[in-house]
Each structure stands twice: as structure tokens, then as C-alpha cells.
Amino acid sequence: MLKRLLAFSVSMALIVGMVPAIVLADETVQQPEEPATEATEEKEQEETSEEKLPEESSKVSAKEKKAKKIDPYIFNGSTLTINKNFSFNSKNDVPWNGIKSQITKVEVNKGVTSIGDYAFEECENLTSVKLPAGLNTIGKEAFYNCTSLKEVSIPSSVTKIGDDAFRSCSILKKVNIPASLTEMGTWVFNRCVELTDVTIADGAQVIGKGAFSECKKLAIVSIPGSVKTICGDAFKHCENLFYLDIGYGVKTIELRAFYDCGKLNEVTLPSSVTSVGDNAFEQCNSLQYVHMTDELAATIQKGVLPNNTQVVPLGNNPMTVKGKKATVKFKKAKKKNQTVSASKVFKFSPSGTGSNLYSKVKGNKKITINKKTGKVTVKKGLKKGTYKVKVKVSAAGDTNYNKSAVKTVTITIKVK
């Protein structure tokens, strides 16, 4: 009996001792995953952010570099680089006012279309300017009194130059006016006393008031026919101007345009000129001959020319013209307009000097005449038959010849 009790006690002790080990092993093998909490998620996000931080820093750095490239302007100690359009209400608004005396070079980058008013006024040490293709506007007083600037190339895209833009650039020697120019302010190159080389491209439409006045070394000027108006005072006091070529197409020369150009000896006003303003050539005391049309001479008043100047009529412009006959097929004319060249309906011998001008006087409404080319258009629907059309024809003349007498001729159009 005693032996049985002892054996039972030993067995129970062994069983009790093994339970913690079994439970522990079970917990190790089957322990469930810890449930996610907000704190855990925040911790994971922080760890992720810390891992990506170097990459994000590199992105910020790239952005900073990009921002630096598009700074409105950059100054490196002597060169001012412009990267965007500027607009200033007054001289005091210019942000580089305090460093003007240090600027020796200006570079305006591509994409800039407008240089604001007063932008580089009185940059007295500025010697070089680079303007981009695509620039449209140069504002008023933009380069006023830049006394070290010798040359400027104005891009062919510029349509407007503001008042006083290059006024008093006292050593500026060379400048160009592009064909794109449609608007020029007042006194743009006034008092550019060293200016000797001026190129005005065919296509430019106006020479502004006082544009080249007091350019005392300017000796030769050619103005293309695209310039319709030479504004008042444009070349006043250009005391060394001795050669002046005014192209056919110029219509108006305003008051005092060439006042006191003391070395002018002879000038031809083309037949396109219809108006010359008061005192336009007054005080041009060397001016001996002015060639012009009889019609223009009749309008010239006292004071326009010096007293000793002789008016020479432009040469006569002989022209003979006869009407011819042209045939148009009815089948084609029934469906669409038909065009007949001028050479098929007009015969010239000689044709006259300068472009011919045509004006229909009488004839069927379905037959029209192009005023400049003389082409005859037969509009669709014109019935079969023979039609006579009266046309006035003349030659416009040019720098040396008057407008021709007007001839009236009859052309014949046959639709069959």
C-alpha cells in the first residue's frame, strides 16, 4: 500500500512539472499576430518617411535649380540677363536702379517680347546689347542716355519703338529700322550725334517725329517706298546730310522734316508724294533743285523751300494703250468665274513708267477689272454674247516721272 501511494505521488509531480513547458511551446508555435493599431501605422509611416527623405531632398534641390534658371533677371557683376517681360510705371520701379553704373552688357533672352519703359535708361557704361528674335516692343526711354552704347541691332520682329527709346545715345554709330516696324514714337534717335550708318528696311511704314533730328554726322539716308509718312522734324538739323533718296510710295512729308539740312544740294520727290508740310526744306541753303510733279508744285507754299531753290518738273510719262478682244467659253463661264489676263485685253506701247492703274467706267456688271493687275473676271452665269467694257488706264510714275495722262479704252469680251 505504501509503495502504491509513493508511485502515485511521483507521477503527479512529473505531470505538474511538464505543464508550463507544454504551454510555453504551444504559445511559441501558435502565437497569433499582434493586431494593427493606429500607433503601429504611424510608426510604419515614420519609418517609411525616413527611408525616402534623401530622395525627396534631391527633388527639392532640382526644383530650386529650375527656379534659379527662370529668375526674372540675373546680374553677375557686369552683365545683366533678362528672362521675362517687365513693365514699369516710372523710372523708380526699375529693380536694378542701384546697380546701373555697373552694367556693361545687357542680354535679353529668347521668349521676352517686350522691353519695358525706362528699362536701361542712363546705364552710362552700357556698351553691348543683345536683343532676341521674337521681340515685339521697345518701350519709351528704354535706352535713353546710354552714352557708351555704340551699336544696336533691332530684331526683324519689332513692330513698335517708343518715345525717346535711344535718345541721346551720344556715341551710337550704327542702327537699323526693321521691315516689321509699324509704329515709331517721337525723338527715338534724337541727339545721337555720332550716328553715321542708318538702314531702313523696305517694309517699315513710318519715320516718327524727330526720329533722327540733330544726328549731326548722318550723311546718307535712303527711305523706302513702304514708308508712307515722314513725320515732322524727322531729320531736322542733320547738318551733314547731303544725299537723300525718297522711294516711290512715300505720300506725305510733314512740317520741318528736313529743316536746316545745310548740305542737301538736290532732292527728288517721287510722283507718289502728294503733300509737303510747311518749312519742310527751309534753311537747306545749299538746295538748288527739287524735282516734283506739276500737281505737287502747285500746292507748295512759300517757306517750304529756300528762296533760291528751283523746282524741276518730273519727266513726262508717255503711254499708249489699245483695247483687244478676248474669248471665254460659255460652258466654263456657266459653272464658275473665268479670269482673263491683262495682256489678252490691253496692248501697251510703251506701257508707261510705274505700275499701271485700271478703273472700269462702263460695262456689264458680271465683268469686273482688277484695279492693280488689270485682270478681267467674267463671273459665272454670264450668257452667250459679245460685251464691250470701257476702262480708264494710267501709269503711276516713279521717282523721275510724273503720273501719265489717263487713257480711256474699250475692251471686248466674247462669250461663246
Image (cartoon, grey):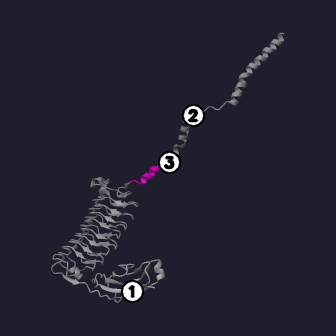
Q: Closer to the N terminus: mark 1 or mark 2?
A: 2
Give the camera-side residue of 367 and 239. Answer: 367
Labelled pair 1, 2 in contact (Cβ < 8 Å)? no
Residue 412: which numbered mark, if any? 1
Residue 49: which numbered mark, if any? none
Which residues are the magenta region? 56-71
Distance CA(mark 1)–CA(mark 2) = 101 Å
Give the camera-side residue of 347 and 103. Answer: 347
SS state under label 3? helix
Of badges 1 and 3, the one in the foreground is: 1
Name the residue: 36% across, 67% down. 155
Using the rendered view, name the quadrant where residue 42 is placed: top right
Amino acid tagged 2: Thr
Point out residue 63 in the picture as x, y percentages from the top left corner.
46, 50
Amino acid tagged 1: Thr
SS state under label 1? strand
Q: Closer to the N terminus: mark 3 or mark 2?
A: 2
Residue 40: which numbered mark, if any? 2
Distance CA(mark 1)–CA(mark 3) = 83 Å
408 magenta-colored = no
Amino acid tagged 3: Ser
Can residue 355 be seen here?
no
**Which residue is disc 3 drawn over?**
58
